[in-house]
Image: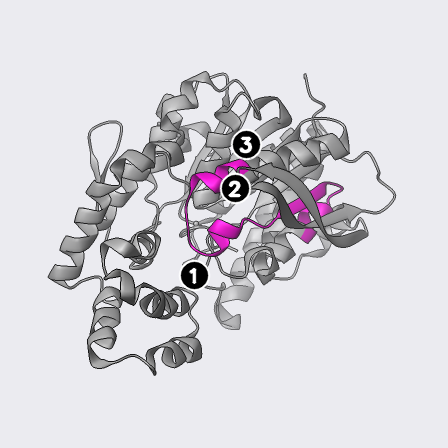
């Protein structure tokens, strides 16, 4: 799971987006693991002397990250995530403009801990939604730390739509879980869901149900992120510019969201089927959707999937300008200064879906009393653990960030 979350600078804080698995050869891994384990063991030994609760959450954070990367958890951390858990699939009803909406969800519950702290984990743009294996593994690992976890399915986000409807679903999900658990709950949003979680938390209708928000690889301004897809440049708060070639995934999401801007009405559904399968990385489905298309439709679809074509890029730029007024509803930037709850910001240094400058903007706009930790980490790309393995201190900073978030989940409201 991309872990779909710089302080000025994050490294000064000591804490500063879904696709590739962590792959390393055994010969390169074993010496580094031994060094890492030794370093962590030494650091945690010091923590143990100073404070066992702090040491425990750091061990739990380390173990959760190892499980998220689908790597074995070493002996010295294994017992801290040993709480047996039960999972439960269900649906709950929430109000919607069209009446009542049934939200599919999954609970991960630590056994024999009915009053455990609680957190809602919000999946990123991924067609598997709450059934994405890495998300399931991460949620289970969090629950094995003794935390009640709920993963609600976000239908729009699951189908690659970033919309106001998802903000409402997030807010209602947090509200529902808070009612079930007896108090405010934490919320951790991956990718665009993190920004939308902050938008929901800014809404007075939902604010009191949020204990804290953790945004991982998330947007502050949808308008700025959309422009980044066209230019490969995102301006930081200090006036410098982050230059990074955007992933094609971003422009494709713009096309899919506003497909009516790109093809005639009569062509919408057949082209949408092709583009959906392409985004879902469903190659057989894409080929099947292409097969019945005539030459003109096939040409349209292929042009849309090649976001480097000048004509395609011009159409994307026009669509962004046409819908710019909608972006403010999907961006937390306008309400961050009013947030009084704890906020944790995590971003991958080389994120080319939502650039890390977005976390810098959020950091600059949040009240100092609300921003509890901000980390821009080379350990991450978008919200996945990256293939390039950084130094031990970078790994430690990531462990420390997650430890702070675990502590926030465990801290009683009001403290």
Tell me the residue that label 1 is attached to: 387
Q: Spatial distance from mark 3 to mark 2, Cα to Cα?
A: 8 Å
Judge whether residue 170 can be spotted in this image.
yes
Question: Depth check: 16 or 116 in front?
Answer: 116
Q: Earlier in the sequence, mark 1 or mark 3?
A: 3
CB-based contact (under 8 Å), mark 1 and mark 3:
no
Question: Depth check: 387 or 302 in front?
Answer: 302
Q: Which of marks 3 and 2 is nearer the N terminus?
A: 2
Tell me the residue that label 3 is attached to: 213
Name the image quarter holding residue 98: top right
- Identity of the residue furthest to the bottom in this view: 291
Q: What element carries label 3?
A: strand
| Residue drawn at (30%, 52%) of the image | 258
Which mark is drawn over residue 401? none
x and y percentages locating residue 136 in the rendered image: 63, 56
Q: Spatial distance from mark 2 to mark 1, Cα to Cα?
A: 22 Å
Q: Is residue 376 above or below residue 37?
A: above
Q: Spatial distance from mark 1 to mark 3, Cα to Cα?
A: 27 Å
Pointer 2 local density, CA inside 10 Å: few below 14, some 14–19, many at least 20:
many
| Residue drawn at (17%, 60%) of the image | 312
CB-based contact (under 8 Å), mark 3 and mark 2:
yes
Q: In this view, does 188 lie above or below 315?
A: above
| Residue drawn at (44%, 73%) of the image | 282
Pointer 3 local density, CA inside 10 Å: few below 14, some 14–19, many at least 20:
many
Judge whether residue 403 can be spotted in this image.
no
Side (left or right) of 155 relative to 363: right
Does the stretch in magenta take in 145? yes
Query: Which marked residue is nearer to the observer: mark 1 or mark 3?
Result: 3
Tell me the residue that label 2 is attached to: 189
Range covered by the magenta-colored residues: 140-168
| Residue drawn at (63%, 26%) of the image | 209
């Amino acid at each position: 799971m991309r872990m779909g979350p710089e302080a000025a600078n994050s490294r000064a804080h000591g804490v500063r987006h879904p696709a590739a698995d962590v792959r390393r050869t055994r010969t390169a891994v074993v010496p580094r693991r031994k060094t890492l384990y030794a370093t962590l063991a030494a650091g945690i030994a010091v923590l143990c002397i100073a404070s066992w609760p702090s040491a425990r959450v750091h061990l739990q954070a380390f173990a959760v990250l190892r499980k998220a990367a689908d790597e074995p958890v070493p002996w010295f951390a294994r017992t801290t995530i040993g709480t047996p858990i039960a999972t439960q699939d269900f649906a709950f009803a929430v109000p919607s403009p069209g009446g009542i909406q049934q939200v599919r969800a999954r609970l991960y519950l630590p056994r024999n801990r009915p009053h455990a702290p609680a957190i809602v984990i919000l999946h990123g743009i991924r067609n598997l939604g709450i059934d994405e294996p890495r998300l399931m593994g991460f949620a289970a690992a969090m629950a094995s730390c003794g935390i009640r976890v709920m993963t609600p399915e976000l239908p729009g986000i699951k189908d690659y739509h970033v919309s106001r409807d998802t903000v409402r679903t997030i807010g209602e999900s947090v509200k529902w879980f808070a009612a079930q658990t007896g108090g405010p709950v934490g919320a951790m949003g991956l990718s665009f869901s993190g920004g939308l979680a902050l938008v929901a938390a800014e809404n007075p209708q939902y604010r009191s149900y949020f204990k804290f928000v953790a945004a991982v690889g998330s947007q502050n301004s949808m308008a700025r992120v959309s422009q980044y897809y066209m230019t490969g440049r995102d301006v930081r708060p200090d006036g410098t510019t982050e230059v990074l070639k955007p992933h094609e995934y971003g422009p494709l999401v713009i096309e899919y969201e506003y497909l009516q801007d790109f093809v005639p009405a009569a062509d919408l559904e057949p082209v949408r089927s092709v583009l959906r399968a392409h985004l879902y990385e469903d190659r057989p489905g894409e080929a099947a959707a292409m097969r019945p298309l005539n030459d003109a439709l096939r040409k349209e679809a292929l042009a849309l999937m090649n976001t480097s074509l000048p004509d395609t890029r011009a159409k994307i730029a026009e669509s962004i300008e046409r819908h710019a007024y909608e972006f403010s509803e999907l961006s937390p930037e306008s309400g961050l200064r009013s947030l009084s709850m704890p906020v944790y910001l995590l971003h991958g240094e080389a994120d080319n879906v939502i650039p890390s400058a977005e976390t810098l903007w959020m950091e600059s706009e949040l009240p100092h009393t609300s921003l509890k930790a901000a980390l821009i980490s080379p350990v991450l790309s978008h919200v996945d653990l990256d293939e390039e393995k950084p130094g031990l201190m970078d790994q430690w900073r990531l462990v420390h960030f997650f430890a702070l978030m675990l502590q926030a989940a465990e801290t009683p409201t009001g403290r």
